[in-house]
Image (tube, rainbow, N blue to C red):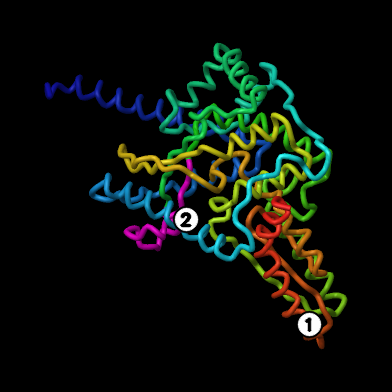
Amino acid sequence: KSQDVSDQARAKAAIKAYSVALRAARKVFTTARIASAANRPSELFRVVGELLRPPEAQGLPDDLATGCSDFAHHFAGKVAQIRLELDSSSIVVSAEVTEVPVCSILWDSFRLVLPDDVEGILGSVRATTCALDPCPSWLVKLAKDGLLDWFVSIINASLVQGSVPSYFKQAVVKPLLKKPSLDPSICNNYRPISNLPFLGKVLERVVATQLQEFLDDTDFLDRSQSGFRPGHSTETALVTLVDDLRRELDRGSVTLLGLLDISAAFDTIDHGILLGRLSRMGLGGTVLQWLRSFLEGRSQMVKLGDTCSDPWPLTCGVPQGSILSPMLFNMKPLGKVIRSFGGCCHLYADDTQIHYSFPSNSKEAPRILNQCLDRCGGLDEEEQAEDQS
């Protein structure tokens, strides 16, 4: 404003220095993100995707309070409608898990964690901050040396008592448009993305690590399941499927392929059926008690901008965005059912590929595939009956 030439020169120099410092800071930050994801392909892919395709800002409704309420009613109503349809087709009413497991108890208590365990988990968990967190998760990671003992005490108390703090069971839902080409004014064009408290995710990672060890030792996971499993990915699922199809083609067989995608798969899981499944696998004691506490008493609310809807309780389902949810879903014995009909399958969480190979003159394959699909659809009802018997 002084119009002095020397002042203008100093201002230009300051702006240039600021731009250089900003570019350098961005470079250091991006380099650090890429380096931290070096051994995690999915995280590296996410980082590169963010750099090449910056996220587009989604328009918010003019009335945020009404928008939050509309989304909340839509998400809750969709799950309630699907559960109603499932319950109306059931041969029995929804059952609670039986207290006595079918097999002997193989795992009834958690292994307590040490500060080094929690420090390693803090380094591996993504620094995503939930609106319910008291401070940003990146700050928690930076201050971990002074917080480790406190974290260890909270986590071990939860494991010993078989109880999940109610604060960890709250979720903030952000509606995400499924495709950029869809109409943003229609609630059905959005999927609910749950944000969970950061420390709750650390606790989940502790349990998930021990649960994975149990599954590896007992070989309970379906061999054809590639989703959210160490050493497996969408690539292994695709390679296996293509290899199977090519082998059958070389044998001169015709292959019938069915691709299944379960609607609201994670949101509609019956807690009683899931707990019964875990009990029959040999889980008991505080382990089963902790998982029951993890499933029950959950709530969530929709957040748009700075406005939130009223929270509503969740009576079924496992939270999307949770670390444990995919592992719990993977325990559904779909692969066993499909193979009992002579078919092959490849699973990636709730995405299922079924294929039957048969001679070119066979007319039985479509009938067998339909029978298999009917059986898969009635799997939950059969497990309910087992729990009640």
Residue 191 drawn in magenta: yes
Q: Nearer the viewer, residue 330 or 98?
A: 98
Q: Nearer the viewer, residue 279 or 132?
A: 279
Residue under circle 2?
80
Residue under circle 1?
364
- Position of the N terminus, as image quadrant, is top left
> At 43% from the left edge and 53% from the top edge, which residue is drawn?
75
2 vs 1, front mark: 2
Q: CA distance from mark 2 to mark 1?
A: 37 Å
| Residue 43, label in figure | none
- Horizontal side of 59 relative to 43 (left or right) equals left
Q: Position of residue 307 (x, y in %)?
A: 30, 39
Contact (Cβ within 8 Å) of mark 2 with mark 1? no
Label 1 Cα neighbours within 10 Å, binned few <14 / some 14-19 / many ≥20 = few
Q: Position of residue 121 (x, y in %)?
A: 64, 27
Span of residues in magenta: 177-194
